[in-house]
Image (spheres, grey):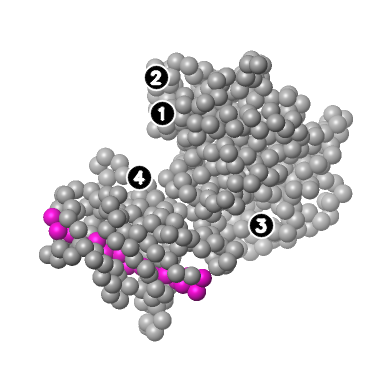
Amino acid sequence: MPSKPAYVVVINWNGREHLETCLDSLKEQTYDNLTTVLVDNGSTDGSVEFVTENYAEVAVLAFEENLGFCGGNNKGMEFALDRNAEYVMLLNNDTRIAPDCVENLVRRMEEDSSIGALACKMLLFYSPEIINSTGVELTCQGVGWDLGMGRHDSPRWNESREVAACSGGACMIRAEALRKVGLFPNWVIYYEDVDLSLRIWNAGYRVVYEPKAVVYHKYSATMGKPGTSLRKWFLSTRNRYFVVFRQYPVLWAPYYLARLAFAEAWMFVGLRKDFPRFRTEIWAVLAGLVYIPVAIVYRLKALVGGYGTCRFWKVINKRYPVAPKVAIPEGRELRPGSDVPSELPMDSTEQPLGGGWYPVDEELPEGSPPGESENYRWIGKSARTYLTSAGGACELHVRARHALASHGDIRVAVKANGNVLGVIEPKDRWETYRVGFESSPGVVTVELEADRVFWAEDTGEWTDYSIRVARVGLASSQDQSDSIVADS
């Protein structure tokens, strides 16, 4: 029996730098009845020309204006549905997917006709041991977040389960479900995937996380660093209100509206000294309230169409009012012409070279006078950076502390250009570990690889960590010893 047609819709706006990696991974898919559709939202960076010249098998829908994430994806989904697609996958352009990703998604759909949409296991592109998303969790206030964000991938994330919604950055939707419930609402971006997922639930399908469908994502590569954009803030808050007013059950309204009002009041208190965000929050809430008449009309149409029952309510998180705190590693890749230092200090909030470094934090060493602190970054299972070497006899020094020593011992391999120089066993105090080695002049790739991480559930930290690192550096040395020496 021939395989059913599946379409992958890749949305793009001036993302030429990401397309080769993304489209090459689609060419390597093991599923044999797959069509890739690039939807270009008026790019001016040569994206369309690059794809038409190098990927003849890709169908290109080029628009002169930016239709937004919702509008562009809707055009792609319409294209697929018009050509009798059975399954439609939505995929961000800043991704790379595993060769069997589409095949695993289709297989799961074929095995269970109750599934209307599948969420992929999304991992961070530059730190692939870290989870980006395993589906979307949703609270009574309409706050949504990516399940597993910032956590280390492990067997605990390999179990399939029902989720409130799937991320529009990487998911597969049954075409039959799309024909019943429609496409994305025209909200530009944010929470459109949540709204569509809830409609799929209400149509009698389920939304499920599929751990065998792996996608590597350059998180926020196309929208900027999380939390820094006022536009993102406005759209996220406004669209969250849209979802609540459109989809949440009327009988539960006193409960979730009271919690929504309390959470919003608390938000305004927290933003009172940040006028730009305070003002943005006000405008977003007002836009949400103005939407109520539109939401009422939508609800009436949904009831007439038979999709008014809130079947998704069973998977809503009714415990937490807001999203949990999230920490994700930072880093940037080495590019031609990059300024590569000989030392990576942790006293700067600038994105470090490499990957696996969590945001800068600081602690006050015991017994130190006020004002003297040790800046550091947590690492998880591993971290990588690039340092400049003058060549010859070098000394690599790493200043580290095992602040979670009460939960067990740890060993960390210190590597240079893939070669293990030695293994350190940090204690619950700051020490500098030094090891000598021979190096050629130029850039040296330095890696720290821990033999374990400590789970957030056990430590009470924001996410899964191993050790703290205050400094990594290279220096010329006359000492030829390759044994590791520690000093305070």
Find residue 144 and report its horizontal and vertical position in percent.
65, 49
Distance between mark 3 and mark 1 Cα atoms: 37 Å
Distance between mark 4 and mark 1 Cα atoms: 16 Å
First in residue order: circle 4 vs circle 2: 2
Tell me: 23 left or right of 138.
left
The prevailing secondary structure element of the residues shown in magenta is: strand
Tell me: 478 left or right of 215.
left
Q: Are marks 1 and 2 in contact (CB under 8 Å)?
A: yes
Distance between mark 4 and mark 3 Cα atoms: 33 Å
Between 291 and 199, the residue placed more toward the observer is 199
User: Over which residues does the magenta segment extend?
Assistant: 392-407
Quarter of the view holding residue 79: top right
Q: Quadrant of the N terminus?
A: top right
Q: Which mark is residue 333?
A: 4
**Mark 4 falls on what kind of element?**
loop
First in residue order: circle 1 vs circle 2: 1
First in residue order: circle 3 vs circle 1: 1
Residue type highlighted by circle 4 = Glu
Q: Are marks 3 and 2 in contact (CB under 8 Å)?
A: no
Q: Are marks 4 and 2 in contact (CB under 8 Å)?
A: no
Between 223 and 317, the residue placed more toward the observer is 317
Find residue 51 and report its horizontal and vertical position in percent.
43, 21
Q: Residue at x 27, y 45 (%)?
A: 338
Residue highlighted by disc 2: 54
Distance between mark 1 and mark 2 Cα atoms: 9 Å
Q: Residue at x 30, y 41 (%)?
A: 335
- Furthest residue in direction front, as rendered: 1
Residue 397 is one of the magenta-drawn residues = yes
Residue type highlighted by circle 1 = Glu
First in residue order: circle 3 vs circle 2: 2
Q: Nearer the viewer, mark 3 or mark 2?
A: 2
Residue highlighted by disc 3: 322
